[in-house]
Amino acid sequence: CRNDCYYCGIRRSNKNVSRYRLTKEEILMCCENGHELGFRTFVLQGGEDPWFNDDRMVDIIQSIRQGYPDCAITLSIGEKSKESYQKFKEAGADRYLLRHETANEEHYRYLHPENLSSANRKQCLYDLKELGYQIGAGFMVGAPGPQTMEYLADDLVFLKELNPHMVGIGPFIPHHDTKFAEEPAGSVDLTLFLLSVIRIMLPQVLLPATTALGTLDPRGREKGFQAGANVVMPNLSPVKNRKQYELYDNKI
């Protein structure tokens, strides 16, 4: 990933992480495996890697679209230009996940280096929506800063204004190779409460019970469903790579 977000295990300046790229063939094998298991949505997720330029992404998207016309294709590959988003849409992408992380500019500054801005992140979401994507936003609960209840209120107001199709929230979990290694993890209970609030605010929204919930609490995802979540996102990545995608410690 070219970015250096302070909380993330795969941030650019972490020299200890084992980095990898899936080949197009590996990606299509994951889709084949998932399709046989009954999956009808595939999420392509990764760091912001310039090697996966527009042409390579368009080729991958078109190949999945041709091979699996009955499946939704979701991208989660970060901040791009509106022109790039347009190309991906024309190639067959349906949905785009881009967590806004925190709607408060001051808090965003605390969590990210100078070259990243909350305003640009939000603009990407509005561009995607304008292009006809189903969009997903979301934030971390208990993020360092420290995150205040006012910041969380800002997040809820932003979600209400944006009216996304999907909202991904999960508790912050520290990673040992970041500046926030000693920070406490976010609260499972507060995350569950916020899932319930979002379910009431956005009754039709797709609301995942996230991996982070399941990492902090063995029954976290089940509790997420009881609180209002209605989506689960199992990992189809090749088993050899799953441990390498280490956004935070002890990821299940």
Image (cartoon, rainbow, N blue to C red):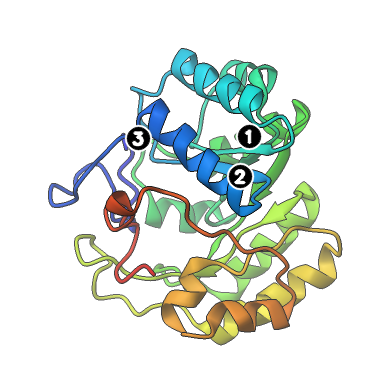
Give the amino acid at mark 3: Leu
Question: What residue is disc 2 on?
Answer: 35
Task: Residue 22: give its label.
Answer: 3
Disc 1 marks a residue whose amino acid type is Gln
C-alpha gap between disc 1 and disc 3: 29 Å
Report the disc number at residue 123. 1
For the point 79% across and 57% down, the residue is: 160
- Mark 1 and mark 2 in contact? Answer it, CB < 8 Å: no
**To which quarter of the image does residue 233 belong?**
bottom right
Give the vertical position of 196 relative to 169 (above or below): below
- Crowding around mark 1 (Cα neighbors within 10 Å: few <14, some 14 to 19, many 20+) is few
Quadrant hosting residue 221: bottom right
Distance of label 1 from label 2 (alpha carbons): 33 Å
First of labels 2, 3 by sequence position: 3
State the CA–CA distance, disc 2 to disc 3: 18 Å
Residue 137, percent from left and from top:
63, 51
Is 225 drawn above or below residue 91 in the view shown? below
Position in image of residue 49 (x %, y %): 35, 30
Residue located 63% across and 34% down the image: 123
Looking at the rendered structure, the secondary structure element under dot 3 is loop
CB under 8 Å between discs 1 and 3 = no
Q: Amino acid at mark 2?
A: His
Residue 215 place in picture, x, y as percent:
42, 75
Along the line of sight, which residue is nearer the eye, 70 or 125? Answer: 70
Mark yes or no: residue 44 visible: no
Whether residue 14 is situated above or below residue 207 in the rendered picture: above
Viewed as shown, does residue 187 lie left or right of 193? left
